[in-house]
Amino acid sequence: MRTTPSTPLTSRLRWRRVASAATATAALLLTGLTTAAHAQAVDPSTSQVTWTRSCALPRHQGEMACNALRVTGGRTAFQQQHGISAKAADASSPSGYGPSDLRSAYGLTSAAASNGSGRTVAIVDAYDDPNAESDLAAYRSQYGLPACTTANGCFKKVSQTGSTTALPTPDSGWAGEISLDLDMASAVCPNCHITLVEAKSASMANLGTAVNEAVALGAKYVSNSYGGGESSSDASYDSAYFNHPGVAITVSAGDAGYGAEYPAASKYVTAVGGTRLSRSSTTRGWTESVWRTSSTEGTGSGCSAYDTKPTWQTDTGCTKRMIADVSAVADPATGVSVYDTYGADGQGWATYGGTSASAPIIASVYALAGTPSTGSYPAKFPYANTTALNDVTSGSNGSCTTSYFCTARTGYDGPTGLGTPEGLGAFTG
């Protein structure tokens, strides 16, 4: 599944990017480097971090790509802070932020210890990860989290039809995505149950069917870490797959820099942008800015071309749906630890970034906050509780004619939405 796509296919994934981004992408394609080239970022010290996409880019309209980026070299922010000299690609030990870091950064330490029992976070991804449960066990054991297994009723893995035996074909890249999602749900809500719903392919139709299955199985919190180009079909996808009142559905905003993706553009979901998260001497102890590596890599954002604006969005520069709503860590250089052993990408411990990390983090914050009220659209909750968020006010993810579409500012902006969690107040309703 790690094939190099043709130029038109990559263009569909990244359409509506600025001309410089399109030019850079085309140059990579012409040299055959799109999936092989590693993006680079400089961490808070001087060490250079490199990474690669986990999943193949879409090859046709209606196909999605996961938004996971696996670190392949350098030293991460976590390693710098802890004086770890090993390179991040050393699979023998964690090299990214762990559960205690994420809970500290987002004011969740107390809630994670006491909340979540009896609540189920669903993870929707494509293809099968044969090692999902055993890898999850290794992650949770490393960080002293309670066991979450099929045997104790905490973990369930099913296909998009709900079958526990007729599972999709395995895929190494998506297996890394699955491990990332399961580990982030565990880190933020260790007392939650987890249901992994695996679509038989990366088409929107099959992933959407998996979302419906997750809700049918009782999940009130559903994380989706994938995206693709917008299309005129999006309104029908909205009604068919994402209109689930009383369910918090999170979707990653994308990793290709400024520009809107679907299903983050759905008016029924919480679109989750990405930040660069670093320790600081502030009272909070952490600082965040917009994640951007280059004109073609960074958190997604933008004004949808098709989806109507939800009533709770009040920004005036975009007459349709604006991305994002909220955000969380996504920069691979300040990335999170993940344990994955399946396929060529699965060597053990790795550090991951991308908005594939931020989407399950936010879904799990919703789970800590409690069951959404009947008939509600949880994407609305942060707009009614903006003081319970860390406002991210620096950085941009590209060039745009309407500044807040791509540049952080006080209050709402596209790349980081209303901000990042500071406890649970912005995720209840």
Image: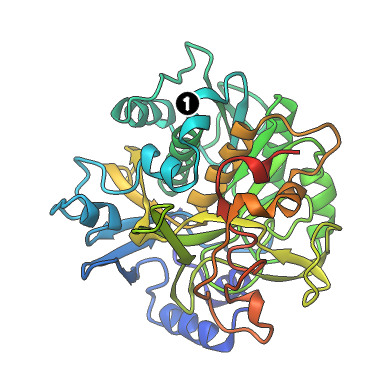
Q: Secondary structure at mark 1?
A: helix
In this rendering, position of residue 425 left or right of residue 298: right
Q: Is residue 217 visible?
A: yes
- For the question of whether residue 200 can be seen, the reply is no
Say which residue label 1 marks: 113
Q: Residue furthest top?
A: 151
x and y, in percent, of residue 323 in the image: 68, 64
Residue drawn at the location 64% of the way across and 60% of the way down: 418
The residue positioned 35% from the left and 41% from the top of the image is 98
Q: Specify the quadrant of the image occupied by residue 118.
A: top right
Quarter of the image with the C terminus in it = top right
x, y percent for residue 364: 57, 37
Q: Is residue 419 above or below residue 156?
A: below
Question: Which residue does the image show at 49% across and 42% down from the upper left?
Answer: 107
* Residue found at the far front of this picture: 283
Q: How is the image coloured?
A: rainbow
Q: Nearer the viewer, residue 144 or 215?
A: 144
x then y, percent, for residue 367: 62, 33
* Res 405 → quadrant: bottom right
User: Could you say which is closer to the camera, residue 179 or residue 128?
Assistant: 179
- For this orientation, the residue located farthest to the left is 85
Mark 1 residue type: Ala
For the residue pair 39 and 113, the one nearer the viewer reads as 113
Q: Position of residue 352 (x, y in %)?
A: 38, 52
Quick one: label 1, few (<14), some, or many (20+) residues within 10 Å? some
